[in-house]
Amino acid sequence: MSDSPDRVPKLSKEEKDRRFQAELMPVIDSLYNFAFRLTLDEDDANDLVQETYLKAYRFFEYFEQGTNAKAWLFRILKNSFINDFRKKSKQPAKVDYSEIEGYYNSEDVESDSDVGGTSSDMRQQAVRDLIGDEVASALNSLPVDFRTVIILCDLEGFTYEEMAKVLDIPIGTVRSRLHRARNFLKDKLEKYAQSMGYGSGAEDQETDEDDTITD
């Protein structure tokens, strides 16, 4: 954030709420998917998304209109996960809702709340349907740094430049980390395929013939 506090334009509450709703809320499903892939827990993912939106609302004046809202939110979520969330995981969240009271009391949110707990279940199911169980299991087993670059690039479609900003690392590091992550994922999936009995019949036949000759 390059702007000094006295240079940041002040928005009226009505304008802030309107822009917040229009520019940031459409990203909520992708944000939840990212949080769920990081935490691997539905309740933790919901808490992380809630914390992200609270911070986004608090610092919304620093968001430059017309820029990539998704990348901005993903960066906030990633920082929250690294700096705060892993330290207080599984602890009850203590949140002051006064700053976003206007938003959470809106008609749109009230209509969303009518579906009860099913919305988060539906989002979680959407994540599961996005990729197969085998790929999901392999992805979830990767270290979080490698898992994150796979999610950002291959699932969310961020460019290398956007990923570098989200993760606060050089583009060269993004490229090398993504290359290693994909290799790790490929290796895990190959091992899974072998454990399920999938393989090259020609290779198996060649191995049997070699064994016969050796004997």
Image (tube, rainbow, N blue to C red):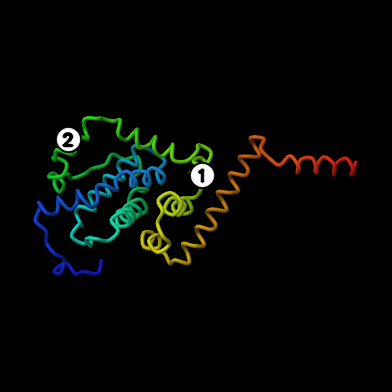
Would you say the residues marked 1 and 2 are in contact, meaning their CB atoms lie under 8 Å apart? Answer: no
- Quadrant, the C terminus: top right
- Quadrant, the N terminus: bottom left
Horizontal and vertical percent position of residue 69: 28, 56
Q: How many marks?
A: 2
Q: Residue at point 35% right, 37% down?
A: 123
Q: Return the residue nearer the eye: 146 or 86.
A: 146
Residue type at mark 2 is Glu
Q: Residue at point 64% right, 37% down?
A: 195
Is the residue marked by circle 1 packed among few (<14), some (14-19), or many (20+) residues within 10 Å? some
Q: Residue at point 48% right, 43% down?
A: 140
Q: Which residue in the structure is indicated by mark 2?
A: 110
Residue 57 lies left or right of residue 144; in this view the side is left
Horizontal and vertical percent position of residue 186: 58, 49
The answer to whether residue 179 is above or below residue 17 is below
Q: Label 1 to label 2, Cα distance in Å?
A: 37 Å
- Say what secondary structure mark 2 lies in: helix
Which numbered disc covers residue 141?
A: 1
- Say what secondary structure mark 1 lies in: loop
Is the residue marked by circle 2 packed among few (<14), some (14-19), or many (20+) residues within 10 Å? few
Residue 198: quarter of image: top right
Residue 123 lies left or right of residue 105; in this view the side is right
The answer to whether residue 77 is above or below residue 93 is below
Which of discs 1 and 2 lies nearer the camera? The answer is: 2
Residue 191 lies left or right of residue 164; in this view the side is right
Which numbered disc covers residue 185?
A: none
Horizontal and vertical percent position of residue 108: 17, 39
Residue type at mark 1 is Ser
Q: Earlier in the sequence, mark 1 or mark 2?
A: 2
Q: Return the residue nearer the eye: 185 or 111.
A: 111
